[in-house]
Amino acid sequence: MKNTMKERWIGLIAGLICNAFGNALSIAGNMGSGVWSASAVNLHNWTSISLGVLLFGIGVINALTNQVLIHHWDGKRFFGEVLFVMFFGTFVQYFVRWFDSIGVNTAPIILRLILSCTGIALFCVGISLYQRANIVMHPNDDTTNILRFMYLKGNATASQLLDFMPPLIVCAIAYFPTGRIDSINLATLFSIICNGFIIAAADRHIWPHLKHNFKTKTATTTE
């Protein structure tokens, strides 16, 4: 491995917190967020189930989907991803409440757009950190890697677009009983267009000493 375990654990923890903080900021700004976070927000509006519980449930479904996609049971991978989303969902819910308490959700629209885009950039930095640490990651990020390397001949764009379909369908379904769609806005377009570029830039410029600690024999690793 290219980094010590201490460095990799720091990368994992920093990435997790940065990802949760950024997602919460984009959700609180309500000018668009990542599409999976948006699906949780719209399910929350429909069912009134806690946002943290929904993020955890969606993550578990993602983790189970990954087991199907890799065609074998990988207990370490599954339980690691479930543990990750447990902390992720809790942190996002806490940060959203804090942002709401300081008035982010009632700020002027231009400021909310800036904050939502900033949140997206922050969670991309978080993804870069824990992907490079490669101890465990959010199951959704693992899904895109599996789709990319096992099914789509390394096509990162196609894997991202395919991964966007389920949460967009969830948002559409939630619209009919509620008559509203939240967290899908201009910043969502920013996320769809810029996620890959921001993650790549973070790989180069945010703690560049943290390398991609991947095993070359594993088909689903990220580079």
Image (cartoon, helix red, strand yellow):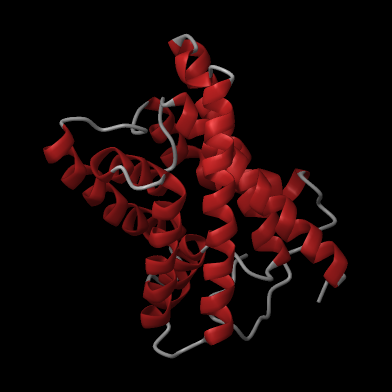
Outermost residue on the top side: it is 108
Quarter holding the N terminus is bottom right
Q: Quadrant of the C terminus?
A: bottom right
Q: Percent position (x, y) of residue 152?
A: 38, 70
Task: Name the residue at 50% across, 12% down.
Answer: 107
Q: Quadrant of residue 144?
A: bottom left
Q: Residue at x 44, y 12 (%)?
A: 109
Q: Position of residue 197 (x, y in %)?
A: 57, 43
How many numbered circles are shown?
A: 0
Q: In this view, does 71 lie above or below 6?
A: below
Q: Against 15, is 69 above or below? A: below
Tell me the residue at 55%/77% (across/down).
79
- Residue 185, percent across and down? 35, 28
Q: In this view, does 80 lie to the left or right of 116?
A: right
Is 83 left or right of 149, judged from the image as shown?
right
- Name the spot of residue 10 as percent of width and height, x first: 80, 58
Q: Which residue lies furthest to the bottom in this view?
A: 72
- Residue found farthest to the left: 176
Residue 67, image quadrant = bottom left
210 displayed left or right of 168: right
Q: Which residue is drawn at 33% across and 33% down?
A: 184
**Looking at the image, is 177 positioned above or below residue 13?**
above
Q: Specify whether residue 198 is in view.
A: no
Q: In this view, does 91 lie above or below 214?
A: above
**Residue 63 visible at all:** yes
